[in-house]
Amino acid sequence: MRGLDVLGAVSQGATNLVALAETLNLNRTTTHRLAATLVEQRYLSFTPRVGYALGPRLLELGYMARAQMTLPRIARDHIESLAAATGDTVHLGVLDGTRALYLDKIPGRRRVEIRSHIGDRHPLRSTGLGKALILDFGEARWRGLYEAEDRDGKPYDVPLSSWLKHMREYAKVGYAFDLEENEDRIRCVAAPVRDTTETIVGAISVSSAAQYMDDGRMKALAEDVRAAARTISRDMGWRGDARPNHGVSHSANPIG
């Protein structure tokens, strides 16, 4: 709470140690320790003879908050329609560090329990939504993410070489699958959402029990999920995909 008070005081113009201490009614030693920690974590910046100012980390969080608050509002009608059309559970998520953060969930009509909740953070390499969020990363970053999750000790049955092969295929076709990798007997199809800069800012997925998601249905669903993601992307300012590799889904086979 004191750290938040420091940020609030700086935002109101208390830029030096004396002013901060007086505003917060704390001694200078405690105030300096709090401010120094916030500078170290980039929530504040400090310039000699100028003083404290709000730091770059707050700007980063502001952009993330803006994206996260805007995307659910724009996507809501589209993911509701997708859930109604497929009968399956639809998720909306964004990249949050090294995890996929679930921002919205529309339950399906089938009696299938998908153990996910809004606000959950899930792995990237084993979820369809996570893979869709990192389609643009390229092989070096994919490898790094895979190895980082290995170091975290999370069990995963897909070898790195096979996973990289699938990721290359997913990047070509513009969608990704979860083939019971994250949750037993649950499969999903996911596609990325882009903004006006062509950047992936989120992803949507359709999830259901494997009995309803054989290979043929997943391939058919891929087009529906990708179409919904494109519609959301256009509402986010995306002008259409100019990349030569995207949309070439007929010759690739991401399953298997």
Image (spheres, grey):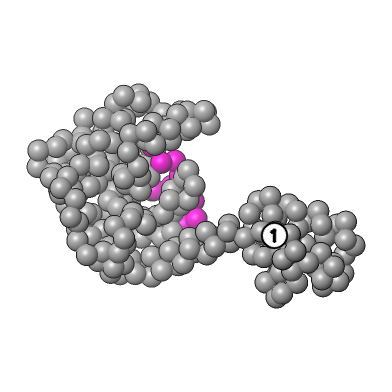
Quadrant of the snapshot with the N terminus? bottom right
The residue at 36%/60% (across/down) is 106
The residue at 85%/68% (across/down) is 18
On the question of residue 24 being in view, the answer is no
What residue is pinned by disc 1? 47
Tell whether position 21 is magenta: no
Quadrant of the snapshot with the C terminus? top left
Q: Decide which of 255, 233 is in the foreground and name it.
A: 233
The residue sitting at the left extreme is 250
Tell whether position 118 is magenta: yes
Residue 221 at x, y = what percent? 19, 50
The residue sitting at the front extreme is 49
Q: Which structural element holds mark 1? A: strand
51 above or below 221?
below
Q: Decide which of 170, 238 is in the foreground and name it.
A: 238
Question: What segment carries the magenta color?
Answer: 114-125
The residue at 29%/57% (across/down) is 198
Amino acid identity at mark 1 = Thr
Residue 194 at x, y = what percent? 30, 58
Residue 255 at x, y = what percent? 21, 34
43 lies left or right of 82: right
Q: Decide which of 196, 185 is in the foreground and name it.
A: 196
Q: Decide which of 208, 94 is in the foreground and name it.
A: 94
The residue sitting at the right extreme is 27
Residue 31 at x, y = what percent? 82, 60
155 above or below 17?
above
Give the image quarter of residue 202. Answer: bottom left
63 lies left or right of 114: right
The residue at 27%/41% (across/down) is 177
Give the image quarter of residue 56. Answer: bottom right
Dominant secondary structure, magenta? loop
